[in-house]
Amino acid sequence: MDKLLQYGRELLELELHEAQKLPNRLGNDFIKACQLILATKGKVVVSGIGKSGHIGKKIAASLASTGSPAFFMHPSEALHGDLGMVTENDVAILISYSGRAKEFNFILPILAAMNIPVIAITSGLDSPLAKSAQAVLDISIEKEACPMGLAPTSSSTNTLLMGDALAIAVMRARGFKEEDFARSHPAGSLGAKLLNHVKDVMRTGDAIPKVGQSATVLDTMLELSRTGLGLVVICEDHNKMIGVFTDGDLRRLLLKNGTLQDSIKAVMTSPGYRIPENWKAVEALKLFNDHNITAAPVVNTEGELVGALNIHDLHQAGIS
């Protein structure tokens, strides 16, 4: 077991040692690579074979999810039809540690004929790939973490890190925000928080607990039981909210020897918390947490009751 820990730590130390050299290598070519991506009117075409291809898929996915439309093109498939996916408005990122992947020998002249700029991620600074590229990102290493020096380890880590640096630098230059990220991740927790508004998750129609201003405490208690939301909204004409009555209010009233025949208007909490329907759902959650409440009515810009919301509705929508 001690040997296994030793092996793992040695690999991580070697990869980190190689990765620490990358920041000092960023210079004019990195700036040019970012500018090429920012200026393109098409997509970023990422290509690589073997381990470089696996990392390339991740780089393409990172670019696409951070504001730079991108896709991965396998070099072998490119030579059998997939080059048809490339347009003259695109920019290409070609990944090869040696810079001598034979498939690129066929692809590079075609890209050049289409005037498609090439960003090379490679250690082969004098390779055919580097010489054909408009920007060269150096991922060279002194030693692979693999003890035989065969399996791409330090080199693949450097490739991944360089791709991340490129994607995030471009993202920040675009002013890409959380809301933009959420739009490409609508099913994730961030998407649920940033894309859902109160009106998307609130209860409506008969699920809204409400009574008129002439109701009694008994009427309101029955409405509390019917809807199970924990509160009832008291409304005057035209559905205008004038107050709320909660489970807690009912308990406190009975402890004070109030009666079920009391007028609800005399014992309600006014005005009570209310949530605008155009708020983001995450803002409603913050209100609940800040004020230690679990439910609130939802109103429109005219102050009319249009819905009701409790904390369970938010949790079920993935907002927590």
Image: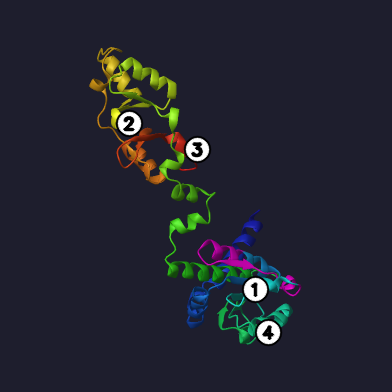
Residue 231: x and y in percent read: 36, 27
Residue 236: x and y in percent read: 28, 27
Question: Closer to the camera, 307 or 257?
Answer: 307
Q: Of label 2 and label 3, which has the lower sequence position?
A: 2
**Amino acid beneath label 2:** Asn
Q: Residue at x 51, y 70 (%)?
A: 165
Question: Closer to the camera, 99 or 68?
Answer: 68
Disc assigned to residue 86? 1
Q: CA distance from mark 4 to mark 2?
A: 70 Å
Q: CA distance from mark 2 to mark 3?
A: 28 Å
The answer to whether residue 196 is magenta is: no
**Amino acid beneath label 4:** Pro
Please state if 320 lies on the left or on the right of 65 as rendered.
left
Residue of label 3: 316
Q: Of label 1 and label 4, which has the lower sequence position?
A: 1
Disc assigned to residue 109? 4
Q: Residue at x 49, y 67 (%)?
A: 168
Please state if 215 lies on the left or on the right of 171 as rendered.
left
Residue 258: x and y in percent read: 26, 13
Q: Of label 2 and label 1, which has the lower sequence position?
A: 1
Residue of label 2: 239
Q: Of label 4 and label 2, which has the lower sequence position?
A: 4
Local packing at callout 3 (Cα closer than 10 Å; few below 14, some 14-19, many 20+) is few
Q: Which stretch did the figure color magenta?
A: 58-80
Q: Nearer the viewer, mark 1 or mark 4?
A: 1
Quadrant placement of the C terminus: top left
Q: CA distance from mark 1 to mark 3?
A: 42 Å
